[in-house]
């Protein structure tokens, strides 16, 4: 069975059900196999007004209820992409997929919620940046979204704003950059201050883990040698540059008892750091992305400049082509927990800003549309993870860590009706020619994937139906993420008490003490 995907049509945005009446509000997903992170069951799912009302067999449902036939299909929580950058102003331009095209593409692939980043410029108010992102996203989003906020500089006011964002604006995660020297990078002192503040307010500290000083040093050398092409991007920041920063972030966070979340884990050695630190009792989470699970860094050496440049992102994909399998195995055994995409897309003419200098190629790749299929293919079809684990790493774990579970990430009575009816047998071939994203390149071009979102239900509305997307700008909502997630902070207090330094009671020394003179 092969499902053909057609390209986006201009009328799609308007073609949403105008009958927002009773039938639209009642939906029965019938005959499928419901998959949660901890169990599977053959059951029907009844939805009313965007909320799951019943899960079971022989359900009594009111007349006029729309029925979606799911026989032979899996009924799973919609995907949560923990890491996107829609319309990000970056490196002199804006990411081409905005909150409309990006979230519409997300839905097409079975993702019903994204988590994006509001990133203030150095010296700019974090709260103002948050409001700016809200003003961009709110009118455009087709699916639900939450925000992480970047901490790109430090002073006491930044700490106060973090508190305000957590208490009043539904932010429970802050991203600190260890790369992008001279723009967003924080030094160790400022990292420590921001980690301490995260802990104080019950937020999760996130890091972009790469050593920006080393990258600056290597970049100058490479350009001097005449290496100006996209391979220079990878050569300037090899694997150990990511691993060093990952280790340093873990140590700094652990020293102040702050839970840590490492975004875009791209290499074996960085992933090993996360695994090992977890074994040592650190509270640390790791997020590989569709790109690092689905492709590799050999593309930087491609003879076609445009092809190589399309893969430029930071940290880079790794030339070691075993990396994707390795990262998937760590997701399988629980050493890594969530999957994002770092979706931050730039078309050929934007990438070309760096045609003569790799440092000017806007960093970022696609993924938001294909993440679910790529993980299904590389994880489930390869036999590394089962459907329950697939749900865990694409949805549930994110909902737990970011404290929106079980509203999101679960098929259960009372949860939001964000559901994907997954056809595990159908195949499609990923291509920029047929994808919904606005970008003109797809890093997964030509990959044949099993697993297709036959139906996607967002807030109880059928928004994807056999390959057609019917989404409307502004249909999604901002989802506040409350502080002190129990999945993150559940053992912090006890751990602090257990690990607290203990004073040794002893009799004071009462012998002689030498006198220090001023020359000493
Ligand atoms: O290359 C990347 N990753 N672009 C987006 C910004 C970031 O650091 O996540
Ligand atoms: Zn980053
Ligand atoms: Zn990112
Ligand atoms: Zn089907």
Image (tube, rainbow, N blue to C red):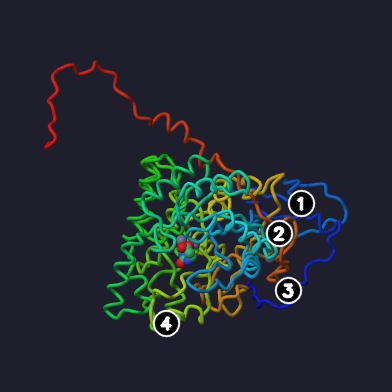
Establish if 226 lies above or below 296: below
Residue extending farthest to the right is: 63
Locate the C terminus by quadrant.
top left
Report the mark closest to the observer, 3 or 1: 3
Percent x, y of residue 439:
56, 76
In primary-sequence order, the first of circles 3 and 1 is: 3
Which of discs 2 and 3 lies nearer the camera? The answer is 3
Classify 10 Å Cα crowding around label 4: few (below 14), some (14-19), many (20 and above).
some
Residue 293: percent from the left, percent from the top? 46, 63
Task: For mark 1, give the secondary structure.
Answer: strand
Is 333 on the left or on the right of 109, as rendered? left
Residue positioned 73% across, 68% down in the render: 470
Left or right, 308 with reference to 416: left
**Vertical placement of 389 versus 490: above or below?**
below
Residue 210 image point, x, y percent: 37, 59
Residue sitting at 34 percent across and 50 percent down?
248
Which disc is residue 12 wearing?
3
Question: How many numbered markers are drawn?
Answer: 4
Tag 4's secondary structure? Answer: loop
Above or below, 151 against 252 in this view is below
Separation (CA) of disc 4 from disc 1: 51 Å
Q: Quadrant of the N terminus?
A: bottom right
Q: Is residue 293 visible?
A: no
The mark that comes first in sequence, 4 or 2, is 4
Q: Nearer the viewer, residue 196 or 45?
A: 196
Alpha-carbon span between mark 4 and mark 2: 42 Å
How far apart are labels 3 and 1 at the CA level? Answer: 24 Å
Question: Of tags 3 and 4, which is closer to the observer?
Answer: 4
Residue where numbered disc 4 is placed? 355
Q: Earlier in the sequence, mark 3 or mark 4?
A: 3
Q: Which residue is mark 1?
A: 47
Q: Nearer the viewer, residue 15 or 508?
A: 508
């Amino acid at each position: 069975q092969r499902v053909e995907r057609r390209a986006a049509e201009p009328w799609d945005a308007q073609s949403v059900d105008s009958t927002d009446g009773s039938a639209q509000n009642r939906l029965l997903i019938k005959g499928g196999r419901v998959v949660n992170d901890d169990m599977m069951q053959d059951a029907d799912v009844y939805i009313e007004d965007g909320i799951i009302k019943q899960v079971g067999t022989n359900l009594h449902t009111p007349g006029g209820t729309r029925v979606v036939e799911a026989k032979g299909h899996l009924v799973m929580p919609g995907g949560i992409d923990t890491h996107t950058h829609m319309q990000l102003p970056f490196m002199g331009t804006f990411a081409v997929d905005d909150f409309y095209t990006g979230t519409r593409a997300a839905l097409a692939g079975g993702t019903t919620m994204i988590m994006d980043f509001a990133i203030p410029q150095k010296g700019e108010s974090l709260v103002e940046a948050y409001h700016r992102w809200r003003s961009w996203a709110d009118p455009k989003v087709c699916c639900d979204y939450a925000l992480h906020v970047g901490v790109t500089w430090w002073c006491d006011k930044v700490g106060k704003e973090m508190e305000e964002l957590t208490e009043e604006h539904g932010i429970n995660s802050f991203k600190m950059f260890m790369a992008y020297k001279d723009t967003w990078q924080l030094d160790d002192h400022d990292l420590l201050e921001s980690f301490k503040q995260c802990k104080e307010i019950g937020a999760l500290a996130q890091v972009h883990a790469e050593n920006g000083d080393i990258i600056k040093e290597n970049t100058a050398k490479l350009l001097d040698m005449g290496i100006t092409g996209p391979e220079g991007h990878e050569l300037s920041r090899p694997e150990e540059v990511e691993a060093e920063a990952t280790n340093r972030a873990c140590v700094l966070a652990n020293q102040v008892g702050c839970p840590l979340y490492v975004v875009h884990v791209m290499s074996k050695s960085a992933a090993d750091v996360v695994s090992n630190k977890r074994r040592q009792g650190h509270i640390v989470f790791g997020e590989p992305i569709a790109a690092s699970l689905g492709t590799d860094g050999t593309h930087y050496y491609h003879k076609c400049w445009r092809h190589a440049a399309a893969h430029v992102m930071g940290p880079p994909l790794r030339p070691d082509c075993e990396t994707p399998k390795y990262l998937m195995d760590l997701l399988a055994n629980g050493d890594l927990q969530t999957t994002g995409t770092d979706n931050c897309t730039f078309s050929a003419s934007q990438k070309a800003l760096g045609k003569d200098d790799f440092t000017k190629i806007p960093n970022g790749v696609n993924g938001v549309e294909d993440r679910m299929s790529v993980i299904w293919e590389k994880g489930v079809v390869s036999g590394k993870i089962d459907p329950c684990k697939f749900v865990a790493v694409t949805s549930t774990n994110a909902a737990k860590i970011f404290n929106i579970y079980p509203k999101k990430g679960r098929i259960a009575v009372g949860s939001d009706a964000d559901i994907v009816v997954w056809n595990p047998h159908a195949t499609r071939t990923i291509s920029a020619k047929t994808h919904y994203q606005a970008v003109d390149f797809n890093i997964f071009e030509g990959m044949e994937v099993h697993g297709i979102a036959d139906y996607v239900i967002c807030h109880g509305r059928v928004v994807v139906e056999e390959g057609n997307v019917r989404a409307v700008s502004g249909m999604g909502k901002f989802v506040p993420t409350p502080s002190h997630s129990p999945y993150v902070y559940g053992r912090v207090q006890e751990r602090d008490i257990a690990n607290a330094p203990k004073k040794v009671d002893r009799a004071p020394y009462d012998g002689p003490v030498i006198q220090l003179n001023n020359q000493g």
